[in-house]
Image (spheres, grey):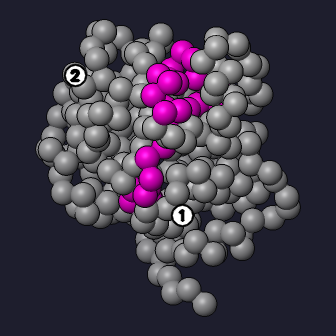
Amino acid sequence: MAMYQTRNIGHPLMNLVRLKGFPILQQLKLEERLLRNSSDNWCIINDGTDNPAIVMGVSGKPDELLDIKSVLGDQIPVIRRFTGGGTVIVDHNTVFVTFICNKDAVSGLKPFPQPIMSWSSLVYNKVFQGTDFYLRENDYVFGNRKFGGNAQSITKSRWIHHTSFLWDYEVRNMAYLKHPKRVPDYREARSHLDFLCSLKEYMPRQVFIDKTIEAIETEFATSSKQLEECENSLTGNYNPTTRMLTEQELETAAGCVSQDSELEKVSDIAL
């Protein structure tokens, strides 16, 4: 049986799962199942994903968002996740933090995109106290440079909010991403390299993870769980919609043949 400890009894219970190098495709599928088939609150922290991958929102169009020829040539996996939002390339230098909560988990929080976004920024204010951290539109920034992108999905009784934090990034990987048509106003037509910054410039990696857990513990009673316990908590059957796009789909998209995407109720938050 896995060892765990519970802190801050009296607060709502949050199951805390810490992972390292867990494949992002598997993480997203797990998150989707926990949203649909669990009645518990979860926080998943994944310290990097071993292999580079591009992750797109549920309604993202590869021909508009990706340099598909380069993606195919370099065999970069492209994942369509179950939440809304934009596109990011992730790797071992990305730190992922996800909240999956019942609608009554945070007292007074209305289950809509902006209130959830605002609440999460207050959590991270505690992590980045003393820096020029801000919530700018739907991004986490230092000053006017983005280092954290967010996406959400809201169901009848639960919601998920997940963030990809750029601890660092490979400059050459940004070439796989096109300049999106829809961008936040504060971007001001800047290129990816001028628009982004790295979290490593502000805080050691382990310090960021430790401070994030400390901030969560001011809001919840945390119970540490192992990955197997996530699986064991699931009830019923649900086949995740998160999936890898096929080579044929990408080739079709490169030919500018549009394909309809199955949409669910998601918030359209740029990642």
Q: Give SS at disc 1.
A: strand
Residue carrying label 2:
194
Depth order, front residue of 234/168: 168
The dot on residue 236 is none
**The residue under label 2 is which amino acid type?**
Asp
- The region drawn magenta spans 45-73
The answer to whether residue 211 is magenta is no
Whether residue 228 sits left or right of residue 118 in the image: it is right
Residue carrying label 1:
14
Crowding around mark 1 (Cα neighbors within 10 Å: few <14, some 14 to 19, many 20+) is many
Spatial distance from mark 1 to mark 2, Cα to Cα? 37 Å
Report whether residue 216 is seen: no
First of labels 1, 2 by sequence position: 1
Q: Quadrant of residue 210?
A: bottom left
Depth order, front residue of 18/257: 257
Residue 2 percent coordinates (x, y): 56, 86
**The residue under label 1 is which amino acid type?**
Met
